Image: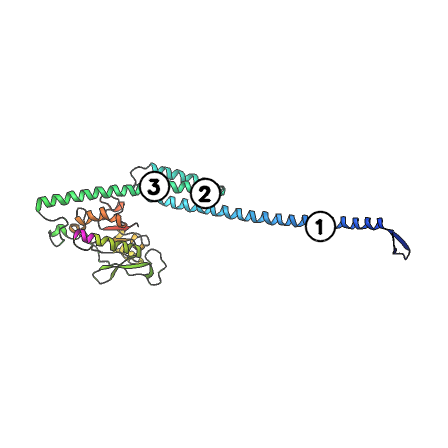
């Protein structure tokens, strides 16, 4: 079989079947080379895209891991500073300090896995310190409760007077230990931003059983107020009367006024635990709520079950003794 075709110059050329097959084969081979080149180009583009995505994801993972490490170090450093002079065995604080130093030294170059490991080690060491602080607070509470109970028993034996006798009796011995200007509990801050001393109404609740001498409710952060309601019910059942309150939430302006009037006895404005809605003061009446009173013995022994404690610094042998001050720890 033959085929007739016109050439470019107008002449005739006869294509045999074999020549036609050869031409088709050459065309097919050329098409395959084009397809292979296109496929290779597409594969290379996909590979570059995958590499870019992997690099971005890896960078995100690394950034997240290092951010978590920075947070753990900051929290651990705050716990280390706050536990100074509080724990009985300082070995746990030494371990936390070592973990913090190691984490800070390696933070800039740590891989995601290494950063997570360092953060975990810091967190574990911090938990050991927090456990030691809690154990020390329990020990101090037990010691103080025992001293108060012994003192109350001695008073009953020597005078027949009941422990925690009313401040209306006992003359000067039972008079208030506060000699400064009058201050009152604060109301929530309208439009407050949530910072210390600027808590909004939505963050606070008033206790149900008492108000201050001006008729202002005693406000606390809502969870602290709920816990205090439960504590007061138990306190009333044990001692026969409600817990008296003197101050609870303290706004920023009141903190400024107290600092000006009382000096370093009052907290630096913006740092008071009262400004968080997590602290209260009972009246500064030594016979009713003082170191050896039945009320304090009960509060120190039973308050922690409701989240309320006498902090270590406010204890009789603490850095700033305040028998009237309690804080909510949850």
Spot occupied by residue 102 in the image (x, y as percentages of width and height): 43, 38
Q: In 3D space, how far apart are the residues under numbered discs 1 and 2 (Cα atoms)?
A: 47 Å
Residue name at image x 76 percent, y 50 percent = 28
Q: SS for tag 1? A: helix
Spot occupied by residue 27 in the image (x, y as percentages of width and height): 78, 50
| Residue picked out by circle 2 | 116
- Name of the residue lying farthest toward the front: 1
Q: Residues within 10 Å of mark 1 (few under 14, many from 20)?
A: few
On screen, residue 297 versus residue 17, left or right, reads: left
Residue name at image x 22 percent, y 42 percent = 142
Q: Which residues are magenta?
A: 235-239
Q: Looking at the rendered structure, which numbered label has been put on residue 129?
A: 3
Q: Main secondary structure of the magenta part?
A: helix
Whether residues under marks 1 and 3 lie with C-beta atoms below 8 angstroms apart, the answer is: no
Q: Nearer the viewer, mark 2 or mark 3?
A: 2
Q: Looking at the rendered structure, which numbered label has been put on residue 35?
A: 1
Q: Earlier in the sequence, mark 1 or mark 2?
A: 1
Q: SS for tag 2? A: helix
Of residue 323 and residue 127, the one placed in the foreground of this image is 127
Q: SS for tag 3? A: helix
User: Does residue 314 appear in the picture of this structure?
Assistant: yes
């Amino acid at each position: 079989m033959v085929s007739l075709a016109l050439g470019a110059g107008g002449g005739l050329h006869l294509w045999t079947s074999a020549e036609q097959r050869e031409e088709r084969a050459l065309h097919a081979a050329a098409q395959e080379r084009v397809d292979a080149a296109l496929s290779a180009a597409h594969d290379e583009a996909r590979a570059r895209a995958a590499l870019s995505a992997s690099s971005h994801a890896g960078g995100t993972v690394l950034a997240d891991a290092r951010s978590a490490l920075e947070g753990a170090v900051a929290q651990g450093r705050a716990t280390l500073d706050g536990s100074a002079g509080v724990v009985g065995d300082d070995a746990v604080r030494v371990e936390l300090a070592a973990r913090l130093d190691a984490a800070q030294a390696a933070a800039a170059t740590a891989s995601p896995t290494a950063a997570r490991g360092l953060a975990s080690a810091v967190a574990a060491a911090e938990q050991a310190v927090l456990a030691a602080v809690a154990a020390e607070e329990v020990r101090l509470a037990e010691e103080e409760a025992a001293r108060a109970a012994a003192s109350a028993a001695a008073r009953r034996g020597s005078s027949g007077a009941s422990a925690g006798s009313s401040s209306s009796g006992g003359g000067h011995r039972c008079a208030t230990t506060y000699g400064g200007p009058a201050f009152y509990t604060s109301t929530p801050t309208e439009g407050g931003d949530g910072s210390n001393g600027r808590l909004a109404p939505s963050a606070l609740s008033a206790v149900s059983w008492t108000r201050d001498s001006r008729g202002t409710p005693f406000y606390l952060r809502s969870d602290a107020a709920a816990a205090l309601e439960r504590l007061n019910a138990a306190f009333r059942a044990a001692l026969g009367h409600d817990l008296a309150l003197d101050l609870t939430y303290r706004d920023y302006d009141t903190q400024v006024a107290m600092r000006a009037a009382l000096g370093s006895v009052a907290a630096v404005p913006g740092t008071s635990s009262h400004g968080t809605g997590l602290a209260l003061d009972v009246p500064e009446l030594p016979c009713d709520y003082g170191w050896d009173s039945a009320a304090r013995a009960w509060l120190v022994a039973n308050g922690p079950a409701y989240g309320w404690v006498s902090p270590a610094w406010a204890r009789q042998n603490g850095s700033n003794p305040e028998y009237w001050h309690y804080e909510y720890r949850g």
